[in-house]
Amino acid sequence: MIGAAALHPFFSSAQSLIETVEIPAGTFYMGSIGEGENFDEAPIHRVTISHAFRMGKTEVTNAQYELFRPEHRALRGKNGVSVEDDEAVVNVTYQDAVDFCKWLSQREGKTYRLPTEAEWEYACRAGTYTEYYTGDYLSESMCRNQVIARDYQNVSLKVRETIPNTFGLYDMHGNVEEWCLDWYGPYNPGNQTDPTGPETGYYRVTRGGSHHTPVQYLRSANRMAMLPEDCHSLTGFRVVESDFSFPAKARKGFFREPVPFVIAPIDPDVPFYSHNHQPSITWCDNGDLLAVWFSANQENGRGMVVLQSRLKAGALNWEPASLFFKIPDRNMTGSSIFNDGKGTLYHFNGVEAAGDWQNLMVVMRTSRDNGYTWTVPRIIAPEHTKRHQVISGTIQTSKGWLVQACDAGPEGNDGAAVLISKDYGETWNDPWDGTPKPQFAAGTSGSTIAGIHAGIVELKNGQWMALGRGNTIVSEDGSRHMPMSISSDGGKTWTYSASPFPPIDGGQRLVLMRLKEGPILLVSFTDHPQRTPANERGMLFQRADGTFFRGYGLYAAVSYDEGKTWPVRKLLTDGEQRFLNGGAWTGNFEMDATHAEPRGYMAGIQSPDSTIHIISSRLHYQFDLTWLEQKPE
């Protein structure tokens, strides 16, 4: 239980900005029986704090905080509270508190942070199990208008004016709520050591209660939470000094049920046809996702339009379709949207002179307001010719070059080309030297990527790697392989070899991209349900127990060594049985433990929160790298 050092706290050095007291390692029982609205305090569970740490004797004051952020002084007295230097600072967000801890750590050469929720309750209780560390009641001297108040009274938030607990901590009940390190979530039952809350969440924990708050919310066990961006006159913080490193959590990973992003428009004036296909997706700086695709009755018709839908930050369902781009009576085949990570969205689109998709020019637009408005279309590849059918999957290289892949022709074995801008989209060129289309045989080279609908990534050594559909490479043993193309000269020439993956065919398009965590991700198909010989259908996937099963359809593969090996291969299903519609050429299909989407034109991005977003011709998939790395049961 609590060590003897608790009875004899000592203080930090006089040179330290924050006066701290020693909190010894120990074990306690956290929470309450959780009656009524206090359900989130249950179950009571045994927690071991394995490390001693030092905690701020008081909450951070205005004077202390304003050494870090002087402009905060303008907020003193807001709502009539926290005016003086030695009153607890309020009107700070979670990030404000975190940033102060970082600043203080650099200033003093120590490690400061916010307390975890478990550390906070352990330090507050100081060996007690009563409602408050003072017993089952708070004295009047510790109360600061503890009622539901529409308007604040002029109460003092001066620190160190109440009775400290036996650790020497002041104002743990009331005064101001205090930010904690943890995301808010339900307690886990059972004994725990140094818990730090859930991995992610919507709210951060606050503890201790505040002025102008009913007294029951000031109890040692009471839990509160706030949106981390919120700030008001009830909440401040105190710091912890500790070099203790929390053990890394074993993340579970997630796979969310696929949902449609192609939603029929509400506006009757928006054209919406029977064939919705060839999508692209990007993340927006405001947290939204934006998807675009073409809608047509026939792919080589003049009526084709490019539609858009938006998944707003925090929403579960995509908005109905609206018109994104259309030049009247021109075929609009091929779209790509891309976020450069610097505040600009790019949109690239093919435009036919007639109705087919062979002779296209390419136009570009940009947006600086999360895709709500766009610049006037600018022609970046003016010739109506082959090599201009835009493919989703724009990349930006380490040199800052923008690389836009395009199909090199309308046929399934025409390969893919690239348009390159070395000046952030001002000028563009195709590095093709005019040589005839190569044979795409393994071990040979040419000026065109093997496979249409190609995905491209830059390797760490500066080379570019591409995978595509068609131009299948047949090995000596008769096995068929998706082609791999490597360029060492910025897309001028490509060398071809057999990848370890099966070829794909009509109505299928792959995704190839670099993940934020470092590995390369491929999303493709095990086979083509109509065109792959029966004896070649499916792939072997490993379960958690080491056994293998044959799976069919959409899968992901991950490479940690720049495409040399792909040790992670997982069917894109969570095993739940679902009857889904993939749209376009895919139609209805059944998803279960061994079957995933059989066809679809895939597009993908990874948003800043590390979620991987894959869309097919109709469906939106969300998962993370951790889920991919975990074998199915």
Image (spheres, rainbow, N blue to C red):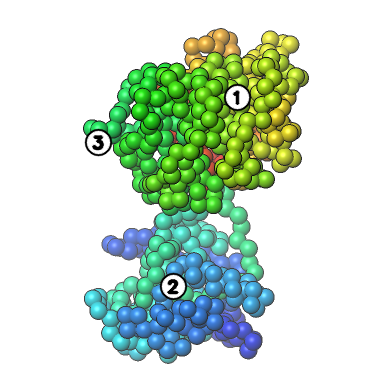
Q: Quadrant of residue 301?
A: top left
Mark 1 falls on what kind of element? strand
Q: Which residue is mark 2?
A: 92
Q: Position of residue 193 (x, y in %)?
A: 56, 61
Q: Position of residue 526 (x, y in %)?
A: 55, 21
- Residue 565 seen anywhere in this rendered image of the structure: no
Please determine whether, in this image, residue 200 is positioned above or below residue 166: above
Residue in the foreground of this view, choosing between 192 and 483: 483
Q: Which residue is mark 1?
A: 416
**Mark 1 belongs to which amino acid?**
Ala
Between marks 2 and 3, how big is the CA–CA gap? 43 Å
Q: How many marks can you see?
A: 3
**Mark 3 belongs to which amino acid?**
Asp
Q: Nearer the viewer, mark 2 or mark 3?
A: 3
Please determine whether, in this image, residue 121 is positioned above or below residue 600: below
Q: Quadrant of residue 438?
A: top right
* Quadrant of image for the N terminus: bottom right
Mark 3 falls on what kind of element? loop
| Neighbour tally class for label 3: few under 14, some 14-19, many 20 plus, Cα within 10 Å | few
**Mark 2 belongs to which amino acid?**
Val
Q: Which residue is mark 3?
A: 267
Write the residue at 54% across / 52% down. Answer: 342
Between marks 1 and 3, how big is the CA–CA gap? 37 Å
